[in-house]
Image (tube, helix red, strand yellow):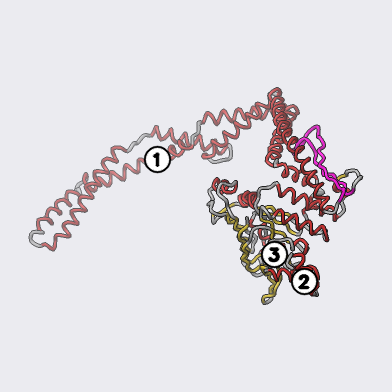
Amino acid sequence: MLLRLVIRDFVIVDRLELEFAAGFGALTGETGAGKSILVDALSLALGERADASVVRNGAEKAEVSAEFAVTPGTPLADWLAANDFDTDACILRRIVDAGGRSRAYLNGAAATLGQLREAADFLADIHGQHAHHSLLRADAQRDLLDAHAGAQALAGEVAVACAAWRNACAARQGAEKDVAATARERELLEWQVKELAALAFDAAEWQETEQEQRRLSAAASLLEASAAALDVLDEGEPAALSNLQHASARLTELTAYDAALTDAAQLFDSALIQLQESALALRRYRERLDLDPARLSELDARIDAVTQMARKHRTTPEELSDVLARLEARLAELTLAADPAALALREQQTEAAYRALAGRLTVERTRAAKTLGKAVSTAMQELAMAGGRFEVALTPLAEGAAYGLEAVEFLVTANAGQPLRPLAKVASGGELSRIGLALQVISSQSHAVGTLIFDEVDVGIGGRVAEIVGQMLKQLGADRQVLCVTHLPQVAARADWQWSISKAMTGESTVSRVSVLDADSRVEEIARMLGGVKITDTTRQHAREMLGRL
């Protein structure tokens, strides 16, 4: 359930902080007041794409934050935990700056738009005011049926399996068409793979080789420098250490005559000790230092071979292992391509896998088509389309397609005794609106999300039908949160709570304002929706009757 929505500098909204209640809530107001802007802002938080146009004129950025309740043990809570997000709440936040750049956060942590959309699948469904027009498209009809069947994931698997089958078919046909070119490429790859494999390149070994080569290359200089230092300290004539030891002993003796010399003598003695230790370390280093011209030559040759190979493949030495892996993978493909029997077998296997998955999808669609057709037909009777029928036709496709083994088409008749025909050919605007609304309400009942938003989906209806729509939305609100942007008083009067959205001038800017309506305010708002500019006592009385508050 949506608990809180905070909007800053979004289109004509300067700042809004909204607390939401459970049940069915209506958002009303004059046309252009910004009712749908609230839905757009929520859509942004739920992962919709946005550009700089959403930033209020003169502002640096737009920001939207939506907080939803999280119940422990639900799929949402499990998803949050699996993605390392805090599970105490679900707060989605989007920031869009004036340059069009967007940032997303989930529970205070940076998130991707993909993650926001995944979370949104557990949180809310938004039905736009033009949603019923999409029902004229075959893909939209198919998607709605799959959603009603709970088979969207299976439909995705079918698409993947179909792609694998098509690729296997193309590989077989390609191999049969250009055998000579495949053979030439395979011969070249075999030589390249053999050459790279013989190099036996290893990234860790390469780093060690470079380090050892640098050390051996500098060995002569290292030996000369350490020998020169030892010659000055202890091995030359005169030796500095011998003179310093004599001076230290003399200073120590003289401290007996003047205590003020003690600090200097001690510091001198400490320095002498450090120099003696340095001489010992230099001797050990000189003894370990390896002057091995043969090994240096071997390392130089190895580095040259690796460098030449990297240059040949136009890459860096560190990426040679990846180059080898790519060449081996391509060689494996061509080796398979040289075996028509293996290619034909793979094609058969991928086709069988596709048809098995698509067959399962057909079963799910057939079951859902019956229940959806029955439910929509029943709703049509309630929506002043007595005698109307709705069916989902599944037409088999012999060759199959990425979306399955059948085409999906919605068929309808608005009057008793008339034959069923495709929805796109027979439904008038008003009928299409009512059928679309019925489909949206019915499909929403099969979803597990806690919040449903209807943005002016009641366009094109009125009178008794509008009252029935209000009843349908109120029934939905009995077990989940329903938000509806509406111009119809019959719909708004059925709401459990109501907000009024209006526009106001602040300086030279127009901004949206939201008012939470109490009982008396709801009467005035419903009366405005009923009566227009001039509101009479009769209109108010009618509004009270609609609200059930006589």
Return the disc, 1 or 2, that comes first in the chain's sequence: 1
Q: Residue at x 32, y 38 (%)?
A: 289
Q: CA distance from mark 3 to mark 1?
A: 83 Å
Q: Is residue 5 above or below residue 352?
A: below
Q: CA distance from mark 2 to mark 3?
A: 17 Å
In the picture, the quarter occupied by the N terminus is bottom right
Picture coordinates of residue 312, whole percent (x, y): 58, 37
Is 406 included in the stretch rendered in magenta?
Answer: yes
Q: Which mark is residue 492?
A: none
Q: Could you tell me which secondary element the residue under label 2 belongs to?
A: helix
Q: Is residue 425 left or right of residue 266?
A: right
Q: Main secondary structure of the magenta part?
A: strand
Is 383 included in the stretch rendered in magenta?
Answer: no
Q: Is residue 30 above or below residue 443?
A: below
Return the disc, 2 or 3, that comes first in the chain's sequence: 3
Picture coordinates of residue 254, whole percent (x, y): 10, 58
Q: Inspect the image, locate mark 1, and give the three-letter code of the amino acid beneath it.
A: Ser
Q: Which residue is mark 3?
A: 498
Q: Could you tell me which secondary element the residue under label 1 belongs to?
A: helix
Q: Is residue 119 left or right of residue 278?
A: right
Q: Inspect the image, locate mark 3, and give the three-letter code of the amino acid beneath it.
A: Gln
Residue stretch rendered in magenta on the structure: 386-415
Q: Which residue is mark 1?
A: 217
Q: Inspect the image, locate mark 2, and give the three-letter code of the amino acid beneath it.
A: Arg
Picture coordinates of residue 110, whole percent (x, y): 56, 54
Q: CA distance from mark 1 to mark 2?
A: 98 Å
Residue closest to the far right: 417
